[in-house]
Image (cartoon, grey):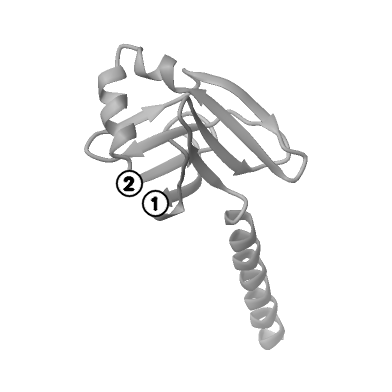
Amino acid sequence: MRIIKNTLLAFAVSMTAIFNLASAQNQQVVFNQNTFEITYTSDVPKYISFMLFGDESLGVGLYGQVSNVSNQDGTCTATYDLDKLLSCGAGEKFAKAYSTCDAIEVFGGKLYDAPVLFYAEEGDFIRNN
């Protein structure tokens, strides 16, 4: 009985790891000239927030978000307007965090109050700007 339990547990852990690996491949961060896009794994759009890490660190919630739509493939994409983020009260800090960004952490809800959806580093970004 113990062998069966351990085998089932190992199988469940393996399947979770495979699911997480497959899900991570659907998540991306794209830096465009006028927008910033975050694609995350979800069937329906959800409230997301993110933290930029670079020379400055800065968290962003809904401010500057212009859309958050389902892509019909098990992912959603949230798009942010860079001009709006750069012209807000923390615009100078955002500009520095954005231009030197070497990592981003995306949350599935309010900043720090929600689970981390994914973490990406510089080599994972797509830069079109």
Tell me if 38 is positioned left or right of 119 in this view.
right
Residue at screen point 26% across, 30% down: 96
**Rendering coords of residue 46 (x, y %):** 63, 31
Q: Quadrant of residue 78?
A: top right
Residue at screen point 28% across, 39% down: 100
Q: Which mark is residue 102?
A: 2
Residue at screen point 63% across, 64% down: 16
Q: Residues within 10 Å of mark 1 (few under 14, many from 20)?
A: few
Q: Closer to the camera, 129 or 105?
A: 129
Q: Which mark is residue 92?
A: none
Is residue 76 placed above or below 7 in the rendered structure?
A: above
Please, what is the three-letter code of the amino acid marked with disc 2? Asp
Please, what is the three-letter code of the amino acid marked with disc 1? Glu
Q: Closer to the camera, 51 or 37?
A: 37
**Rendering coords of residue 94 (x, y %):** 31, 25
Name the secondary structure under disc 2: loop
Q: Quadrant of residue 59?
A: top left
Name the secondary structure under disc 1: strand
Lower sequence index among marks 1 and 2: 2
**Disc 1 and disc 2 in contact, CB within 8 angstroms:** yes
Q: Closer to the camera, 28 or 19?
A: 28
Q: Quadrant of residue 129?
A: top left
Tag 1 residue: 121
